[in-house]
Amino acid sequence: MGELPDGPPDPDLAVGLAEFVGLLGDLRTWAGRPSYRVLARRVGPLMRPARTVPVSTVVDVFRTGRRRLDLDLVLGIVRALGVDEADTDRWRRSCLRAHGPTEDGSRLGNGPAGVLAQLPPDLATFTGREEVLARLLADAAAPRPEGVRAAALCAIEGMAGVGKTQLAIRLAHRLVAAGRFADARLHVNLRGFDPDRPPADPSAVLETFLRQLGVPAERIPVDGDERAAMFRDRLDGRDALVLLDNAADEHQVRPLVPTGPRCLVLVTSRRTMAGLDGAAVHRLDVLDPAEAVDLLAAVAGRERIAADPATATATARACGHLPLALTMAAARLKARQNWSTADLLDHLRQGGIDAVAVGRRSLRPVLDLSLAALTGRARTLFLLLGVQPGADTTPHAAAALAGTTPGAARSALEGLCDEYLLLSRSPGRFELHDLLRAYAADTAAGRIDAAARAAALDRQLAWYACTVEQAATTLLPSLGMPPTLLRRPPGTVLDFSDRSRAVAWLEAEHGNLLAAAAAAAVAAPGAGVAAEAAWRIPAAASVLRAVSGRWPECEALLTTALSRVRGPDLAARAWIENRLGATATELGQQDRAEELFTRVLAKRLLLGDHDGEAAVRNNLVIFYGRTGRPDLGLAHAAAALDLVRRGANTDREASALSAKSACLAQLGRSAEALELIREAVAIREARGDGHRLALAYIHTASRHRELGQYAEAESYGLKGERAARLSGDRFGEGEALLGRAKDLIGQRRRTAAADCLAGAAAIFERLDAPAFLAETRQLQAECADPASGPGPGPSDLSAVRAPGPGPAGR
């Protein structure tokens, strides 16, 4: 016997199968030439699963002229001959290379069946998605943590038709082109959402995979768990890609995930896979506008789309930038050679959801599958969301719509997000894609009777009308809208315990409020919920515009509200016209304001509404003060004060005292004005009136300032600043800082005044309050000039400011 080789042969030297078999013989020689019988005994326990291996089977491996080898058996022999795992992997790769491509273009897998290059073709029309592809490629390339025996798992999720499958296929082909997954590329459609067949049984899928991996049918276990174990064993240590398309849920996917750290599993689903341990979840949205037009061009022809870019953009928008809808629409255009892009757009606009179709393919059946997968409660809510007027919703609004509790509505909304039938772009807010909205509305018309749809809309309109009034009253406690018979659905009341919450809600819901009011106007032929909501919603929504000084917007909302008041509702008309008069005052429309106030005062007297009459007279006080006629204002202030004291309305009394104080100050009677505003402060302090107390402090500071009492004024200004900050009144905080600056200048404390002015300027700039900002800037310039005098600066704007944030309510 000759000497043994110094080291094992290099498997990378094998060019073909014959050379590979020869190198196996050299390996046996290096291992001491164990007999075939001994080798067979060693190999059996190393097989996966372990089994008895006939001696003849081992002998056949070493015979030249073989056209195909059993890879598992080869690796068992290599291990039995003493090769460590790292070098065993080199022998595995060499064996695969030695076999070369098969007749069908695939490479050898785990035995004679070995059809492992199963990826579907990569479509030439695939467009965009480069950013998400980059993230997916990075996830696929990320090294597995030390000691982790698990496959990399990437889930691509999104609504029906968003292009999940084609993205996964494009990713898989890119990875293969980069040299990855040479051992096996498995693919299966799990039929999670299929119109004709139920979701695939994971056990049946495993049987197919095992056969493709070379396991004889008679050796495949019957039990699903055993099949999953064998599948994991077969892919252990191999460079394999498993593409699980159209998964129904996490339970269907889990048995199909191998443990080999060199494996990658790609899952696509229109249901969330976030519950899969270790999964990198990629949520796919619709295409951006440019990508959507590019997809139209890729399918229909670039010259046709480029001929009318504006119409192509509108067509992409009509398809909701959804890849499936875009592809169908473009295919229809391609099939209609006499159509222009404008013809296609007209077809889509006229045909609605059913126009998104080509040949036997259409969007509706795809969405029907998603709808059918929902529970009854979620299905009903989804359909009703197509009926609701707003662009998005919240659990409270959805609860009103569906007649349920906010908790139940939130659960259903989150479930719809998990099904990718809803989007949640910010916490607590949910919206429908445009095509899904059209589908939901159309389907609701056929599945929910008209009376139930009308009742749902009434519940939501009542909720919006009541809630917007609640938020507006938080900002302006004297709002005093006429009494309503509307009732919020039980359990849907929001917490507006401070101004900041009310402001945040009014800002977030502004678009929905306008949409709800418009829907109410359309649905309101006579009396009822819709008729009242049509004017109440925009009227109450105007308060935020008034508080923030956006007077043109406030006027537009109030004008809309007035146009929607049905019949001879004097109380509603008087309330709106009073606020329109105050808004006209702020806009400098003197003649219109006076005309409105005169008309409203006559209506209040006719109605015998003393509280409403006092509100109008308070606004007249402000109006006459602004127009340089404080003597006329004083008469109205005295009358308003007498009215509210008879009615024991302390909130109105404090406002009337403030208004009368402002009139007296303009008439130069500052000492009297100071006494009245002190009475107002006492009332506000006893009531704990938050931002209105802050304004009373600010007015008290003004009265002291007019008397040259700068230290006392600065003390009240500091109280006003703190109260405004606590109540979330940013404008009041700025006004208090401006007043304090004047008081500090009066005390020759210019450095401290400059700090206050800087804070005030930042606030007024942010709130877009040009008059107050101009006064602040002028004082800043005077503070910076040592030659300027010590006086308090320009005239005090707050002396004629309304006694509340914006015009008085009633």
Image (cartoon, rainbow, N blue to C red):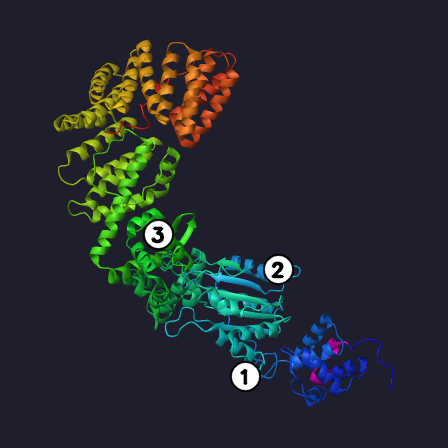
Quadrant where the N terminus sits is bottom right
Quadrant where the C terminus sits is top left
Where residue 142 is drawn, which disc sits there? 2
Residue at image location 35% in from the left, 21% down from the top = 685
639 vs 514, left or right, is: left
Q: Amino acid at mark 2?
A: Ala
Helix, strand or loop under label 1:
helix
Q: Amino acid at mark 3?
A: Ala
**Tally of numbered discs:** 3
Residue at image location 48% in from the left, 76% down from the top = 204
Helix, strand or loop under label 3:
helix
Is residue 7 in view from this perspective?
A: yes
133 vs 650, left or right, is: right
- Looking at the image, which is closer to me, 168 or 190? 190
Crowd rating for badge 3 (residues with CA inside 10 Å; few <14, some 14–19, many 20+): many
Where residue 409 is drawn, which disc sits there? 3
Quickly name the residue at label 1: 217
In primary-sequence order, the first of circles 3 and 2 is 2
Is residue 124 in view from this perspective?
A: no
* Residue numbers of the magenta segment: 10-19
420 is within the stretch colored magenta: no
Image coordinates of residue 215 in percent, x first then y, are 58, 81
Q: Quadrant of residue 241?
A: bottom right
Q: Amino acid at mark 1?
A: Ala
- Looking at the image, which is closer to me, 271 or 178? 271
Distance Cα–Cα, label 3 vs label 2: 39 Å
